[in-house]
Amino acid sequence: MENMKPLIVEFMIGIILLGISFFVKNDYYSTMIFSMGIGLTAGAAAQIIRIIYWKNPKRQDAYEAKKQETHINRIDERKQYLRMKAGHITYQIMTFLLLLLAFMLSLFRAEAWIIVMIFLLFVFQWLVGFIAYRILEKKM
């Protein structure tokens, strides 16, 4: 229960933000606050459900095996090198893409959709890192 306290606080903050969003008159800020509330609430709820699922006594052996495997993967030098290499490759790719994006946005005089584009770049950066890690893991 002790490890769920921050998640419960996060869940409650999300609920509060959802409530506040209904009282904000400006549509832009109302939508932003509502989205943050949904994100916090859903993320915290998913983590709470995950903790409850794995703390079930029926799954204790599988949970302990999963924790042991995670610990081994964290201290394994090969895995550390692969994570570092994947991060380096991702950084190089994202640097090039951000420069290209800055040039394109200056040509098109972009407005509100910049936010969506930056978010998609964040998702793309994570995905490239994940794929690079998996490819490097198979090669080594």
Image: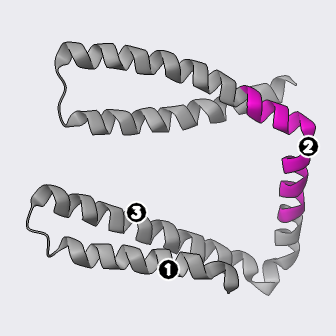
Q: Which mark is residue 76?
A: 2
Amino acid bearing label 3: Gly
Q: Quadrant of the C terminus?
A: top right
What range is drawn magenta here?
67-85
How far apart marks 3 and 1 lie (CA) works out to 14 Å
Residue at figure coordinates x 80%, y 83% from the top left: 58
**Dominant SS type (magenta):** helix
Q: Position of residue 19 (x, y in %)?
A: 25, 79
| Image vertical order of residue 58 relative to residue 24, above or below | below
Amino acid bearing label 1: Val
Q: Is residue 79 magenta?
A: yes
Secondary structure beneath label 1? helix
Q: Is residue 18 left or right of residue 132?
A: left
Asked whether the residues under the numbered discs 2 and 3 touch, taking CB atoms below 8 Å apart as contact, a structural biologist would say no
Of labels 3 and 1, the one closer to you: 1
**Upstream in sequence: badge 2 or badge 3:** 3
Secondary structure beneath label 3? helix
**Upstream in sequence: badge 3 or badge 1:** 1
Residue at figure coordinates x 18%, y 59% from the top left: 29
Residue at figure coordinates x 17%, y 31% from the top left: 111
Q: Position of residue 25 (x, y in %)?
A: 8, 67
Q: Camera-side residue: 24 or 60?
A: 24
Secondary structure beneath label 2? loop
Q: Is residue 50 left or right of residue 139?
A: left
Task: Identify residue for label 1.
Answer: 9
Of labels 2 and 1, the one closer to you: 1
Amino acid bearing label 2: Asp
How far apart marks 2 and 3 lie (CA) works out to 33 Å
Q: Which mark is residue 39?
A: 3
